[in-house]
Image: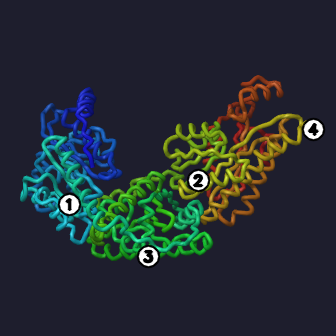
């Protein structure tokens, strides 16, 4: 591991923050925190923490000694000065003389001594940073160090590896007791460069930012060298592969089955769903295909705080043979039932020893391992699933390296439970309010158009994950990018069955499955029906009817595999019930699509799949272009403004109005075969 310190970059950061009134110490603290946070071998997703002891001016104008320490919710990879809240140092140091301090009192005292009452909560390891005398302190969960400490003889290995360069602290849960133990360990050997917290992580420190940072790099590099020597002496391939089926089922087929099994029923056809993130690089495959997977994968977490993101153990499944996929699907349900039972037993055993009973968390695994295929991270959102997958990959590296030099061993069950059910974490339960469509995956065809983009934005606001499909690859990529990183943009020709299937398979690979489809793609052709060429009418039916059928069939395929129902939403048109002159080429297939939605409601309601339609009129879009608006206005003897507002309310209807109708239908769990009219009022088009 090489140092990434750059004097030029450091000076640039100091100068940039000086313009905002940030002092040199805090600017350098931000700089080296980012260097650490941007290396996944050291820090992942909000893990680790850093601090600097400096002087600040409070609101009364007094100069006070403060500890600027990483705040809750901040990620070191992109931290700003605001992410290192200043806490008065003197009151923190006075706590050293206490024999005990509850976590709640510790948090309260830290908040009482913030210079800015609006600042985030300081790290739970604030007191550890305060009790050590150094100005700059760095803490990471370095993968290489964990591989050495996560052993039955981890302490002996650490002492042999580092000698008197580090102090060693046994595993203690973060908080006051750990802070006192760490301070005592340092005072027993005050010349050390750092400190190893067994089965937890590593600290380095120094009187300037560069020293603390480069000591971290040097200490971790020493562990990496130690592991490299172990690989050379024992050979790279320490995880012996198991025998797997010759032909495996595809990820796109497996993911919806796994996702559906994970969903928790919530009554009246509702489910608490999960989003998946798939990984299958060489390191993952070497790990999950190991013959002893059931042993080392179930041995626990690499570092205790990971349990909050991944639970203590992953779900292990059988390899999915392509010639017995039905059998695989059955084993998934059985394996998950066993996992739930084991988790509930774990909770009951450990809750029995609590003086204040804990509130049980859900029993759903956050990592699923599928031999021959890969791993799935599981989360309430795509972002959470990605975090779980990242942590699982880091754990794989740690466990694999630990197995090279010995045998991986995590903390015990009681310690694991205490971390997972930490009172500070329990206090957060119930605070977060999920948006109505959180945990759900939506696919929108015609996604690059005005209605498609507006619909995507509306579903995103309600918490859904979104995939856009469109024939125009560049346009759908731009639309997805403009809507944010949660959106998947796919090139797809909805008139091509193979293209549609591939698109839906890609959605399953990306998110694990699908819950809502907005079948929106379409185009309008004009001409008197008696003069209309057959080729043009057939072309319109291909896009404005048969494409909807192809999209719906693929959606049903995925929804059936999940077994949690779903929602099909069709964009029809007032032309379906109130045809306009010279518009039969468009209206006829749209009328068929309206009845297609009702047929899906009739045939698949028993599977929990709802089907509804939005009946919109006169929406400015790629379908109703400015040229077509002018032409239709002339056909009706109106000016363009009169044409666009020619409804009972006298208001122009927008793509956003259509989008809201789709969201409404997605949320109406007991409505199917329904039609929502979005046209400002047109009695001739009203359904009856």
Estimate how packed mark 2 is, as few (under 14), some (14 to 19) or many (20 or more) residues with alpha carbons within 10 Å. Answer: some
Q: Secondary structure at mark 4?
A: helix
Q: Secondary structure at mark 3?
A: helix
Please name which of the two marks, 3 or 1, marks the residue nearer to the observer: 1
- Distance between mark 1 and mark 4 Cα atoms: 83 Å
612 horizontally vs 65: left or right: right
Residue 18 vertical placement versus 313 (above, below): above
Compare residues 506 and 635 and report the one nearer the observer.
Answer: 506
Q: Are marks 1 and 4 in contact (CB under 8 Å)?
A: no
Q: In the image as oriented, which residue stretches furthest toward the right?
A: 530
Task: Using the image, tell me which numbered label, if any, was put on residue 246.
Answer: none
Between disc 1 and disc 4, the foreground one is: 1
How many neighbours does mark 4 have within 10 angstroms: few (below 14), some (14-19), or many (20 or more)? few
Q: Residue 635, how many percent across, how many down?
A: 83, 27
Q: Secondary structure at mark 1?
A: strand
Which mark is nearer the camera, 2 or 4? 2
For label 4, the residue is 530
| Left or right: 136, with 78 as reference point | left
Q: Which of pointers 1 and 4 lies earlier in the amino acid sequence?
A: 1
**Relative to 507, 134 lies left or right:** left
Other residues around mark 3 within 10 Å, as few (<14) / some (14–19) / many (≥20): few
The residue beneath circle 1 is: 197
């Amino acid at each position: 591991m090489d140092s990434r310190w750059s004097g030029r970059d450091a000076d640039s950061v100091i100068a940039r923050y000086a313009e905002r009134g940030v002092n040199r110490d805090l600017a350098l603290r931000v700089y080296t925190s980012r260097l650490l946070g941007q290396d996944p071998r050291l820090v992942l997703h909000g893990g680790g923490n850093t601090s600097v002891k400096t002087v600040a001016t409070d609101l009364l104008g007094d100069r006070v000694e403060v500890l600027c320490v990483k705040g809750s919710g901040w990620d070191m990879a992109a931290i700003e000065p605001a992410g290192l809240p200043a806490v008065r140092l003197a009151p923190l140091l006075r706590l050293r003389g206490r024999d005990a301090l509850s976590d709640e009192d510790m948090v309260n005292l830290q908040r009482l001594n913030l210079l800015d009452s609006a600042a985030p909560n300081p790290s739970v390891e604030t007191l550890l940073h305060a009790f050590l005398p150094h100005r700059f302190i760095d803490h990471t969960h370095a993968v290489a160090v964990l591989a050495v400490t996560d052993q039955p003889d981890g302490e002996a290995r650490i002492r042999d590896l580092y000698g008197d360069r580090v102090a060693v602290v046994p595993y203690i849960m973060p908080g006051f007791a750990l802070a006192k133990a760490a301070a005592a360990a340092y005072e027993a050997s005050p010349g050390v460069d750092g400190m190893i917290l067994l089965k937890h992580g590593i600290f380095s420190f120094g009187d300037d930012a560069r020293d603390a940072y480069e000591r971290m790099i040097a200490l971790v590099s020493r562990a990496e060298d130690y592991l490299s020597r172990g690989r050379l002496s024992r050979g790279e391939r320490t995880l012996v592969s198991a025998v797997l089926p010759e032909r495996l089922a595809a990820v796109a087929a497996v993911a919806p089955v796994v996702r559906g099994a994970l969903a928790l029923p919530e009554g009246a056809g509702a489910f608490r769903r999960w989003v998946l993130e798939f990984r299958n690089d060489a390191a993952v495959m070497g790990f999950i295909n190991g013959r002893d997977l059931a042993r080392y994968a179930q041995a626990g977490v690499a570092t205790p705080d990971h349990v909050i993101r991944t639970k203590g153990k992953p779900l292990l499944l059988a390899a999915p043979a392509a010639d017995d996929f039905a059998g695989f699907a059955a084993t998934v349900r059985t394996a998950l039932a066993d996992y739930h039972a084991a988790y509930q037993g774990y909770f009951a055993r450990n809750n029995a020893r609590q003086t204040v009973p804990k509130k049980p968390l859900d029993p759903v695994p956050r990592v699923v391992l599928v031999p021959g295929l890969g791993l799935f991270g599981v989360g309430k959102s795509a972002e959470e699933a990605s975090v779980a997958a990242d942590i699982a990959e880091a754990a794989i590296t740690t466990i694999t390296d630990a197995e090279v030099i010995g045998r991986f061993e995590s903390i015990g069950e009681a310690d694991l439970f205490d971390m997972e059910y930490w009172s500070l974490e329990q206090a957060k339960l119930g605070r977060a309010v999920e948006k109505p469509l959180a945990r759900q995956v939506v696919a929108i065809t015609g996604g690059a158009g005005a209605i498609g983009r507006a619909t995507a934005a509306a579903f995103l606001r309600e918490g859904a994950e979104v995939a856009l499909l469109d024939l125009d690859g560049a346009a759908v990529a731009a639309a997805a990018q403009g809507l944010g990183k949660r959106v998947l943009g796919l090139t797809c020709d909805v008139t091509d069955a193979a293209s549609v299937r591939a698109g839906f398979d890609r959605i399953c690979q990306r998110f694990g499955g699908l819950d809502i489809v907005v079948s929106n793609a379409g185009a309008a052709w004009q001409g008197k029906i008696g003069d209309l060429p057959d080729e043009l009418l057939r072309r319109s039916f291909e896009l404005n009817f048969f494409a909807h059928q192809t999209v719906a069939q693929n959606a049903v395929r995925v929804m059936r595999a999940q077994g949690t129902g779903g929602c099909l939403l069709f964009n029809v048109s007032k032309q379906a019930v109130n045809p306009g002159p010279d518009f039969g080429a468009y209206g006829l297939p749209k009328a068929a699509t309206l009845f297609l939605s009702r047929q899906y409601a009739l045939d698949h309601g028993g599977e929990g799949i709802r089907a509804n339609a939005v009946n919109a009129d006169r929406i400015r879009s790629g379908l109703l272009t400015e040229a077509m608006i002018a032409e239709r206005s002339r056909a009706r003897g109106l000016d363009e403004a009169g044409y666009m507002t020619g409804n009972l309310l006298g208001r122009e209807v927008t793509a956003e109005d259509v989008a809201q109708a789709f969201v409404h239908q997605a949320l109406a769990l007991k409505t199917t075969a329904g039609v929502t009219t979005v046209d400002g009022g047109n009695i001739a088009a009203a359904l009856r």
